[in-house]
Amino acid sequence: MKPPIYVTQPYLPPLEEFIPYLQEIWDKKMLTNGGPFHQQLEKALCEYLGVKHLALFSNGTLGLITALQALRITGEVITTPYSFVATAHSLLWNGIKPVFVDVDPNTLNLDPARIEAAITPHTTAIMPVHCYGHPCDVQAIQKIADNYNLKVIYDAAHAFGVQDEVGSVLRHGDLSVLSFHATKVFNTFEGGAIICPDAKTKLRIDQLKNFGFVDEVTVVAPGINGKMSEINAAFGLLQLKHVDQALARRKSIDAAYREALKNVPGIRCLQDAGEQVANYSYFPILVEADYPLSRDALYQKLKDNSIFARRYFYPLITDFPMYRGMPSAHRENLPVAFAAAQKVLCLPIYPNLANSDLARVTSILKGD
């Protein structure tokens, strides 16, 4: 039996590198509540990502929930059906109605051409997702938001380190929310962050993630407990030392997949976001009708060979019971997203993926 290959595995630096961080936490006896490692990681991430203000969270979902609270979003928010459920769940947690619109067939990001038709008098914001780390059409989305006086909150869970021609893609919109879950390009075991445009917004978000406390006796908002622990922050500082090496390896795996699969009938790779913007966080393929196997049959064949690909994102968010009754969730309104969900398969990509294991995956895809 060959060893299993998973769609992703977290990069784990040598354990001995983490021990000094743990020792310092034990010595200082400060485990959470914005300790020294927390403060160091916020500063280091701002420098690495090229942003001015960043608020750490215990996970990305709480970041999304708090971002909506920080901007006082109500009513309806336009978003994508093609994402992880946390995107839409964060809206329901805030009593907001998600309104789903279809995605672009090339990027699988929210299609700006379909946004305006979904705007109603109750619409207050747009929540796009930089799917697979490929940047949304931020200029088109911002133009619509400006025309209709809407806020824009980016679910940037996949977009750590992603750049555009000017700088970090995280600077777009009113807020951007990152995930540092163990499956992400950069991780803190569990974690996340909100990119803030100014110090005033960061202060409000920092209060909201700490129950709404301003000082020991003053609570100004119904906040939540979203604080990142010192252990998670310390691991993030260690991860940051290795992230460029990890990104370089992901880039080489992406290139190897594209070369190996370029002439395989029925296998379509999504367009390359380009070296200047990509972080190679996922490697999705679309299994088209002219491939000898259906997507699910290929998924099972890989699984039978101990290769655990994932159908990100299947089912669509709009297929789950809490959403499918909404008018905007009807499949006839979302043909591109529905077709992609039936075809997509994300292949293994992570820094420690051996070339021999990559060859195992591509050999099966090519039918060798």
Image: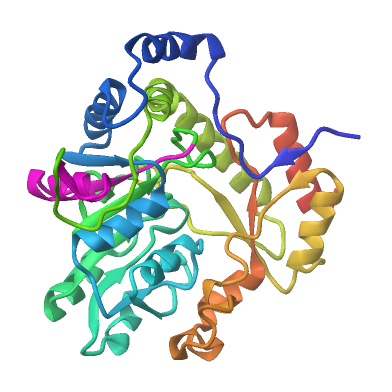
Give the camera-side residue of 303 and 218: 218
Q: Is residue 267 visible?
A: yes
Residue 228 in which image quadrant: top left
41 or 356: which is nearer to us?
41
Query: Is 164 left, or right, of 197 in this rendering?
Result: right
Task: Identify which residue is drawn at 86% across, 50% down.
Answer: 304
Q: Classify the position of the N terminus by image quarter.
A: top right
Determine the residue located farthest toward the front in the rendered image.
Answer: 217
Query: What colouring style does the render use?
Result: rainbow
Residue 81 vertical placement versus 197 (above, below): below
Q: Give coordinates of residue 332: x percent, y percent.
A: 53, 90
Residue 80 x/y as whole percent:
42, 72
Q: Is residue 157 above or below residue 27?
A: below
* Magenta stretch: includes residue 81: no
Query: Is 109 rendered above or below residue 243?
Result: below
Q: Position of residue 348 (x, y in %)?
A: 65, 43
Name which quarter of the figure residue 291 lies in. Answer: bottom right
Q: Is residue 204 magenta?
A: yes
Total label count?
Answer: 0
Identify which residue, 202 or 134, lies in the foreground: 202
Extreme residue in the right direction: 1
Which residue is at 33% across, 20% downward? Answer: 30
Query: Image height check: is 5 above or below 304?
Result: above
Please report the residue visible at 42 percent of the width from the left and 63 percent of the height from the top: 87
Q: Is residue 14 toward the left or the right of residue 186 in the image? A: right
Going 60% across and 70% down the picture, which residue do you hit?
Answer: 341
Q: Is 326 or 253 nearer to us in this picture?
A: 326
Residue 166 at least partly seen? no
x and y percent of residue 91 in the render?
Answer: 37, 69
Image: magenta residue range: 190-214
